[in-house]
Amino acid sequence: MILHALDMRVESGETLAIVGASGSGKSTLLGLLAGLDTPTAGQVKINGTALDRLDEDGRAELRGREIGFVFQSFQLLPAFTALENVLLPLELAGLENAVELAHTALQRVGLQERLGHTPGRLSGGEQQRVAIARAFAPGSRLLLADEPTGNLDPATGERIIDLLFELNRERTTTLVMVTHDMALAGRCDRVLRLEDGRLH
Amino acid sequence: MALVVSVAAVSAVGFFTDRVQQALARQSNLLLGADLVLTSDYPLSAEFSQEASRRGLLTSHTIHFPSMVTHAAESHLAEIKAVQKGYPLRGRLLISAKADIPATETVEIPQPGTVWVEPRLLEQLEIQTGDKITLGQRTLLVNAVLRAESDRAGDIFSFAPRLMMNSEDVSSTGLIQFGSRIKYRLLVAGNASEVAAYRHWATPRLKSGVKLEDVSDARPEIRNALAKARQFLGLAAMSSVVLAAVAMALAGLRFVRRNLDACAVMRCLGASQSFILRAHLLQLSMVGLLGGLVGCVAGYLAQIVLSRMVGGLLLEGLPQPSLLPALQGLLGGLAVLLGVTWPLLAKLRDVQALRVLRSDLPVPRLANWLSFSPALAVVSVLILWTAKDARLGWIALAGLTVFLALAVLFAWLSVRWIRSLGRAQAGSLRFGTSNLARHPLSSISTVAGFSLGLMALLLVTLVRGDLLRSWQATLPPDAPNRFVINIQKDQLAELKSFFLREGLPPPAIKPMVRGRLVAVNDKPLDVSRFDERARRLVEREFNLSWAQDMEADNRITAGHWWKPEDAGLPMLSLEQGIAETLGLKLGDWLTYDIAGTQVRLRVVNLRKVEWDSMRANFFGISNSGMLEKFSASYITSFYVPPHRETMLNRLVKTFPNLTVIDVSAIMVQVRSIMDRMAGAVQFVFGFCLAAGILVLYASLAVTSDERALEYTLLRVLGARRRQILLAMLTEFFLVALLSAVVAACGASVIAWFVSHQVLNLTYLFDAGLLAWSIGIAGVVIPLAAWVGLRKTLNLPPSRLLKST
C-alpha cells in the first residue's frame, strides 16, 4: 500500500506544496489527482466530477480540459518543435484558435524567437518554459507540477519558479506542486508532508 | 526474426534444389533407362549394337515419334515409343489393368498387336483397356494402362501422352516415312568399366546428328531446369536476405543505443574493451545460432511446399535433402548478421566510461554509410555466389541496389513534401501525417523494404497473367490453330481436295527438307565457339524450305529477294534472329548436309519473321531450283473454327500418317507449367514480403521509446485512445500508400520493358495494379504496425510520472 487514508481538499486558486522524501508516494498522489491512476479505495473529485465514474477516455478528456502538467524532465516530444509541443493539448481539445493561443503562450514565456526549435536545440530552462506554456495555453484551471526544477541549476530553477507563480497568479489557477525543496514549498499557500503514505 | 527469415528463404531453396540434385545423381541411369544411350535422327549403324554385344553389354533399341491416335470419332496426338524385349535396361515400368487400381512393376513390354497407354490418352480418346485404337494403318488393342516409365519422369517438355508399342508393329503402321520426325535410340547397360570402354570406342565413330549420353549428362533438360531454378529461386531468396540485413541493422542500432550506458558502467567497474566486445559477440552468436536453427527448420518446412509445386514437374519421388543447404543457409545468415552488427558492436566497445558521470556527453554517432560496408560486401558476395554466373549476379545486385535507392529517394522526397504541407489537415490526421515526417528512418526504411517484396509479387503476377493474355489477344481471331506435319508429296493434291470437300479454304502447304549446317564460308563449323543456346540450335538439323516468292508475314531487313531469273542460283534467305545468334551475315556461304549430300548456299537477304502469326515459317529458305531434288515432307497450318473440329478426325482417318498439332492445347500446357514455376517464384518472394514486414518491426523498435513517450504524453494531455489509434493508422496507411506506389511503378516499368522488348506489345499502365497494390499494402502495413504497437498504445499514462 503506497498511500493510506488520504483525505485532502484543495480550494480553487490555492497553491499547495506536497513534500516528502524519495519513495514517500508523492508521484503516486499526483497521478491520482490527475486521473492518471485510480485509487484502490476512495474517490478523487475535480470540480465536482468524480474521476472513478469516468473511463480512461473520459479522464483523458477531463485532463485535456482542466489540467496542465509540468514535469521534472520536461516531457517534450523530441521530434516536435516548441510550437508543436504547445499546440498538442490545444489540438487535442479541438480548439479553433489553437495556433493563436500557442503563439501567445510562447510569447508570454519569452520564447517567441524559438518557435521552430526542437527540444534538442533548447536549453533546459527553455524546455521547461515550453512545458509551462503548454500547461497554461489551454486555460487549464488546475496545474500539477512534479519537481519542476529538479533537472535545472539553481539560478535557472529560480527563474522558472518565478515564471510559474507569476502565470499562476495571472490565470488564478490552482497549483499543486510536488517537491522536496522546502524553500520552494514555502512559496505556496499550504504545505502538506507525505510520510509513509500518510499526509501530515 | 530477421535471421530466421533470411536463413529460411535461403535454406528452403537450397533444400529443394538439393533434393532434385540428389535424385538426378541417384536416378540418372534410371532416368536414362540405361547406363548409356545413343540418340539419332536416322537409324543407327548396326556396328554400334554389334560392338556393345561383343563387349558383353546389354542392348535394346527404341523408336520415338509423335503421331495421331484414333478411336471412333476421337483422335489425339500421342508420343509413341516403340520398344524391344529387354527394355528398359535400367529403371522400371509400372502398369495396371485400369487407371484407378494400384499399379504393378513389370519386366515385360507390350506384345505385338497391343499397346500400353497413359491414363491421359484414355481420357482424351474416351476409351478403356480392351478397346482398340488406330495408329497409322494399324489397329491395335489397348491391353494395359502405362502408369510409370522411369526414363520419362519429369518430361515437362512433352505435351502429348505416351503410347508404348512393340517395335515389331512399327513398319506396319506406315508412319515411318521420309521426313518423319523420328528419334532412334540404342540403350546400353552393363559393367561400369565396360560401359566406359564402349563409350571410348563409340565417341570417335559418332557421325553428325548422333548424340551420346551417359549417367553424368542424363536428362540435360532437367539439369538445365534445375540450374535455372537454383539461379532464379536463389536470387529471389537473396532479396529477402538483403531486407533481413536492413532489419538486422535497425535492430542492432536500437540494441546499441539501449546498452551504451550499461557498457559505460561496465567500463567503470573494470571491464576492458575486449571483454565488452567478447561478451556482446557471444550474446550475438548465441542469438544468431538459435535464430539460424529455427530458420533452417522453417526452410525445411517451406521446401515441402516448393517440392510439391515444382518438384513434380522435374522428377518424381524426391529423396530427403542433405544437411548441406542448412549449413549454407546458417553460415550465410550468420555472416550477414556479423557483417551488419560488427560496426555497431565496435561502438559499444569504444563507449567512454565518463558517460556515467557526464550524461550530457553526446551519444556517439552510431552509423554512417561506411559502417555498413562489411555487410554490403557480405551480401554482395552471397548474391554473386548464389547466381553462379557473374553477369547475372551483377545484374541482380545492380537491380536490387537501384530499386532500393530509388525507393529510398522517393520515400525521402515524399516525407519532405509531407513536412512542407504544414497544417493542412486537422487533428489526428495531421498528427499521423506529420509523424511520417518526424520518423523519417522508420518511414523510409519501411517503404523501401516492403515495396521490394510487393513489387516482385506484382511483377510475377503480371507476367503470369496479364502479359500472356495480352499477347494472345493480339493474335487475330482466325490465326492458325493447327499445324500439320509429315505430309508426303503424293498427298498434296488429295489434301487440297479434302479441304475443298470440307468447305474450308485449302491452306498453303510448304515443302521442308532437313539439313545440318556443317560449314560457314567453307570452314568446318566449330560448335565450341557458340554459347549454350546457339550450340543447341546448330547441333540439330535445320528445317529448310524453298520458295519463289516471299511470304506476306516476312519482311526483308537486309539484302534483296531473288527474281524469277535467279532460279537455280545458290541463294539463301536467312531469318534475322538466327543469323544474329549464330553470327552469320549477308554474303556468308553456308554448307548444309542434306541426307548425306552437301549443298552450298549464299546468304543474299535477311528476313524478319512474324512468328506470332502462327503460320509455318522457316529459318532458311532457298531459291527455287536448289533443294527440290531432295525428298521432302510438307507442312501447313490452318484455322479450324470451334464448331468444325470434327473435320480433324476425318483428316487423320483419310491421311493416317499426318501429325496434327493443336497449338491452343500446347499453349494451355505451357501456361500450366509457367503458372507452377511462377507460383514457386512467388512463394519464395513471399519471404521477401515477410522480410519487408520485419523491416517495419525493426524500425518500430528503433523508435519505440520515442513512440511510447508520444502516446503516453498524448494520453496525459487529453487524447482519447481512438484519437491516438487514428493517428497511428493514418501514419502507417501513408507508409503503405508510398510503398504501394513504389511497388506498382516498379512492377509496371519492368512489365513495360518485358512487353516492349520481349513480347513486342504496347503495355499501358494498369490502374488496377495500383489499386491491388494499395489494397494489399493498405491492409498489411497498418495491421502489422498495430500488432507491433498495441502494447505501446495501451501503456498506462501514469508511467510518465514514474519516468521523471
Image (tube, rainbow, N blue to C red):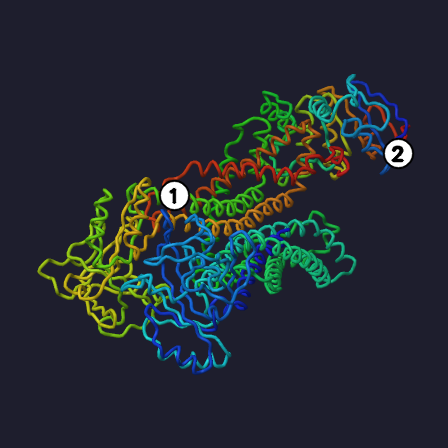
Residue shown at the point (57%, 39%) measured from the top left:
B780
The front one of A113 and B479 is: B479
Q: Which mark is residue B10?
A: none
- Residues tagged 1 and 2 counted as in contact (Cβ below 8 A): no
- A104 with respect to B201 (left or right): right
Mark 2, secondary structure of its residue: loop
Horizontal arrangement in the rendering, residue B22 relative to residue B546 (left or right): right
Amino acid found under the numbered disc labelled 2: Met
Q: Is residue B419 visible?
A: yes
Q: Chain of mark 2?
A: A
User: Which residue is at a point 36% across and 63% down the rendered structure image?
Assistant: B533
Is residue B538 left or right of B249 when viewed as pictured? left
Which residue is more in the foreground, B131 or B528?
A: B131
The label on residue B469 is: 1
Residue A140: image location, x then y, percent? 70, 22
Viewer-proximal residue, B172 or B593? B172
**Other-residue count near label 1 (Cα within 10 Å), few / some / many at <14 / 14–19 / ≥20:** few
Q: Is residue B589 above or below residue B263?
A: below
Which amino acid, mark 1?
Arg
Q: Which one is nearer the viewer's eye here, B35 or B613? A: B35
Q: Which SS class for mark 1? A: helix
**Residue B136: x, y in percent?**
33, 58
The residue at which mark 2 appears reads as: A1
Q: Quadrant of the C terminus of chain B?
A: top right
Q: Residue B756 at x, y = what percent?
A: 34, 47
